[in-house]
Amino acid sequence: MNEPECRDSAIFTQPDERPSPGLLSIVIPCYNEEAVIEATHARICSIAPSLGMQLEIIYIDDGSKDSTLEKLKHLATDDTRIVVLELSRNFGQQAAMSAGLETAQGDAVVIIDADLQDPPEVILEMVAKWRTGIDVAYGRRKSRDGESVFKLISASIFYRFFAAMMPYSVPVDTGDFKLCDRAVVDTVCGLPEKRRYLRSLVPWAGFRHAPVDYDRDARTAGETKYSVVSLLSLAADALLLSSDKPVRIIWLLVIIFTFVGASGLAFSLTASAQAQTGASTVIAVIGFISAAQTAGIAIVGEYVVRCYREAQGRPTFVIRRKINSKS
C-alpha cells in the first residue's frame, strides 16, 4: 500500500559529495553604495581564482538615490558574471536579499553586504566548510571594528534575547553574512510569507550549520543606512515574525497582577484601619495594571497588522529590470 503524500513538508535529496567545480552565487544588496561598490566588486573578483568554482555575482539595487545603479550597469558591461536586479523602489534589505536568493542559480549561495564590513575573503572558508557537507556556513563575529560601545552592547543583548525567544536554535553574534546550500535556498524561497526576516528563516529550515569566525571591519566608505528607528522596526519584525512568545508574556503579566491584586485584597481585609495603604498605593497599582493592559493590546495589535499584510498577498519586492540575467 502506498504511503500518503505529505503536503506540508519539503523533501530534498542531497548528494553525498558537493558538485565540482560547481557554481557559486554571491548575493549583494545595495542601497546608496556609490562610494564603495567598485571596491567591493574588486575584492570579490580578487578571491574568484581561489574559489575553485564558477562565479555568479548578483547585485540588487534597492532603489538607490545616488549613482549606485549606474556604476553597477557599467560593471555589468565588462563582466558577464554580473547580474543586476533593479528594484522598482526601496523595499528594504530583507526584500532585496530575497530577490537575490530567488534569482541565484548557484549550487551554493552567499549573502554579503556591499559595505565591505564583512571581508569577502571569508567566503573561501565558507566554501571549504560547504565542501565538507555543511549546508549553512554562517559568519560569526569575533569583533566589530568601528562601532560604538553602546551599539556593541545593545547588539549583543538583542542577539541573545532574540535567540531566547525563538522556538528553535538561532546562532548569536551573526548577521546576514552566510553561505547556504541550494537545498536551503530552495526551502527558504518556497516559504509563503511575504514579510521576511532571513536570520530566523534560515535556522528554521534546519539542515547542518557551522560557524566561520571572523573579525568584522569598519565601513570602508559611506555611512550606515539604519537609523535608530529603522533598527527598532527591524528588531520588532525579527521578534513578531518569528516567535509567538511576546503574546505569551501577556499571560505572565496576568499572573503577576492577579497575585498583586490578591495580596492587596488580603492585606486590606486583615490589616487595621491605621495600617491600611493610602490612595497613592492604589493609584500606583492601577497605573501598573493599566500599562500592562495597554502593552498587551499593543502586542496583539502588532500581530494583527502583520497578519493583515500577509493576507493582502502583495509581493515582497518588484523587479523593474534585470541586466545580464540568464533567466
Image (tube, rainbow, N blue to C red):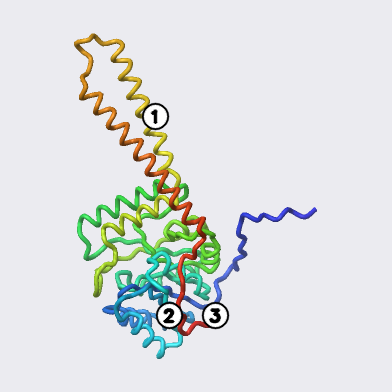
Badge 3 element: loop
Residue 90 position in % (x across, y down):
37, 70
Task: From this view, report whether residue 160 is shown above or below residue 261.
Answer: below
Q: How many marks?
A: 3
Please tell me which of labels 2 and 1 falls first in the chain: 2
The Cα–Cα distance between marks 2 and 1, rounded to whole angstroms, is 54 Å
The Cα–Cα distance between marks 2 and 3, rounded to whole angstroms, is 12 Å
Q: Which residue is mark 2?
A: 84
The Cα–Cα distance between marks 1 and 3, rounded to whole angstroms, is 56 Å
In screen coordinates, is 304 left or right of 215? right
Q: Nearer the viewer, residue 76 or 81?
A: 76
Q: Quadrant of the C terminus?
A: bottom right
Crowding at label 1, few (<14), some or many (≥20) Cα neighbours within 10 Å?
few
In screen coordinates, is 34 left or right of 204? left
Task: Identify the residue at image location x=27%, y=27%.
Answer: 285
Q: Which residue is mark 3?
A: 327
The three-letter amino acid code for the residue at tag 2 is Val
Please tell me which of labels 2 and 3 falls first in the chain: 2
Q: Cβ–Cβ below 8 Å for labels 2 and 1?
A: no
Badge 1 element: helix
Task: Identify the residue at image location x=53%, y=78%.
Answer: 22
Tell me the tag on residue 246. Answer: none
The three-letter amino acid code for the residue at tag 1 is Ile
Please tell me which of labels 1 and 3 falls first in the chain: 1
Task: Identify the residue at image location x=24%, y=70%.
Answer: 223
Residue 40 position in % (x across, y down):
33, 78
Residue 263 position in % (x across, y down):
32, 20
Crowding at label 3, few (<14), some or many (≥20) Cα neighbours within 10 Å?
few
Tell me the tag on residue 255. Answer: 1
